[in-house]
Amino acid sequence: MKNYTIILCCAILTFGSGALFAQKKQGYFEIKIYKLKDKSQEDRVDAFLKDGYLPALHKAGIKNVGVFKPVETDTTFGKRIVVLIPYAKLDQLAEVADLLAGNNVTGPREYLDAEYTDPPFVRQESIILRAFPGMPGMEVPNLTAPRAERIYELRSYEGPTERIYRNKVKMFNDGDEIGLFKRLGFNAVFYADVIAGGRMPNLMYMTTFANQVSHDEKWAAFRTDPQWKTLSSMPEYQHNVSKINIYLLRPVGYSDF
């Protein structure tokens, strides 16, 4: 028994925490975007999500579902609702689709029984993601500010090629960009590869802030941080992002976080 313990300890020292960390299973996420044309559609989707969809997900064992809308100054304010759904395994995505197709979701009839002449949304878009090894699951942010003041920032980083894109992913994991965000208090919800979506190759991540002032202060600190200056100036990490999209969101009252 003593020899076994010594061997185990040596293995830990040899491979480090990274070997143990790599054993953690990476989770999956779906970002579902409802595109709307007016307040009537927004109200019907809100009612469906609050009274039908989220309760059905909870019943199926899926917790911590986030629902967000663009900040008031965004041009898509009133025209988008963003839903973030975490999955422990990819099979759950199909299970949720079967749940909806099986007529197992109750909710407002104005949504469920809408006529083709008056649909409750313009279109839906789904983006499927797999969590980074550096943060293999969702973390619910520890925010106490009123929901109406909170900022949830969703960022999308597109790469010019698959090879160059993987370099940016490496920058987050091996380069410890994730650790830098954590040290500066960005309260990240997830970091993930897009494995199916309209913009690929692509990674996305979400960070959270008590309010707009906190958001601006933390990004100012990030840009001047010595670790970031060193990391971003390294030759191997140059030109690995071709396009960045930034979405500032607020959680709705019925969101799980």
Image: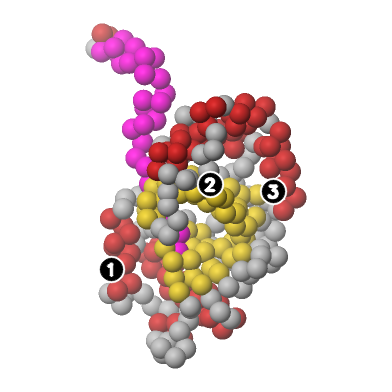
Left or right: residue 69 versus residue 191 is right
Which of the marked residues, 3 or 2, is nearer the chain's N terminus? 3
Distance (Cα) linking label 2 and label 1: 37 Å
**Of tags 3 and 2, which is closer to the observer?**
2
Q: Secondary structure at mark 3?
A: helix
Residue 139 in picture, x, y percent from top left = 50, 46
- Dot 2 corresponds to which residue? 242
Does any portion of residue 141 appear in the rendered image? Answer: no
Gap between marks 3 and 2, in whole Å?
Answer: 24 Å
- Picture quarter with the N terminus: top left
Badge 2 amino acid: Ser
- Other-residue count near label 1 (Cα within 10 Å), few / some / many at <14 / 14–19 / ≥20: few
Q: Position of residue 148 (x, y in %)?
A: 68, 62
Where 3 falls versus 195 (above or below)? above
The residue pinned by badge 3 equals: 215
Of mark 2 and mark 1, the one earlier in the sequence is 1
Give the structural element (helix, strand or loop) at label 1.
helix
Looking at this view, is 29 or 160 the one in front? 160
Q: Label 3 amino acid? A: His
Query: Which residue: 43% across, 79% down?
Result: 107
Query: Which residue is depicted at the point 45% across and 84% down?
Result: 119
Q: Give left or right: position of 58 versus 216.
A: left
Q: Are marks 3 and 1 in contact (CB under 8 Å)?
A: no
Mark 3 or 1 closer to N-term?
1
Reading the image, the residue beneath label 1 is 98
The residue that appears at 65% across and 60% down in the rendered structure is: 147
Q: Residues within 10 Å of mark 2 (few under 14, many from 20)?
A: few
Looking at the picture, does residue 184 appear above or below residue 73?
Answer: above
Q: Position of residue 6 (x, y in %)?
A: 31, 10
Q: Looking at the image, which is closer to me, 239 or 158?
A: 239
What is the span of residues highlighted in magenta in the rendered image?
4-32
Q: Is residue 123 visible?
A: yes
